[in-house]
Image (tube, rainbow, N blue to C red):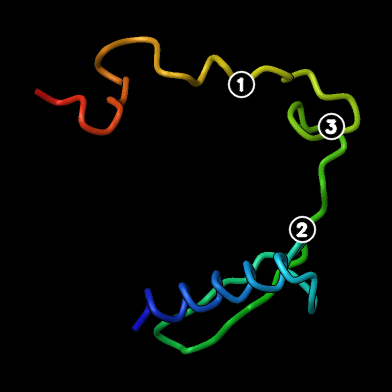
Amino acid sequence: MLPGVIGLVQATETVKLVLGLGEPLIGRLLTYDALGMRFREVKLRRDPKCPLCGTSPTIKDLSIHHATSDTCATEPAGARG
């Protein structure tokens, strides 16, 4: 049941964002306790000192995360021999 509940919440958030309806979970974290069947909402604050999304970002290039070796590289579809 857990994947269904979480998938439903994710799909609902996507529909809300695409259609511009309702109040999306932006700035909030929704947690789910499957054993207790409880949801909890936690408000999040943006960190102005964050090096990626803060007011003065120092990380501006994410190309370092692209695969640089054959061990991590992904192959295009149909490339396997």
Q: Earlier in the sequence, mark 2 or mark 3?
A: 2
| Amino acid beneath label 1 | Leu
Q: Which residue is mark 3?
A: 49
User: Where is the N terminus found, in terms of image quarters?
Assistant: bottom left
Image position, residue 62 (x, y; %)? 61, 21
Front residue of 19/10: it is: 19
Secondary element at image label 3:
loop
* Foreground tag (1 vs 2): 1
Q: Is residue 28 left or right of residue 6?
A: right
Q: Residue at x 47, y 89 (%)?
A: 37
Q: Earlier in the sequence, mark 1 or mark 2?
A: 2
Secondary element at image label 1:
loop
Image position, residue 42 (x, y; %)? 71, 68
Q: Is residue 47 above or below residue 81?
A: below
Image position, residue 51 (x, y; %)? 76, 26
Q: Is residue 72 above or below residue 10?
A: above
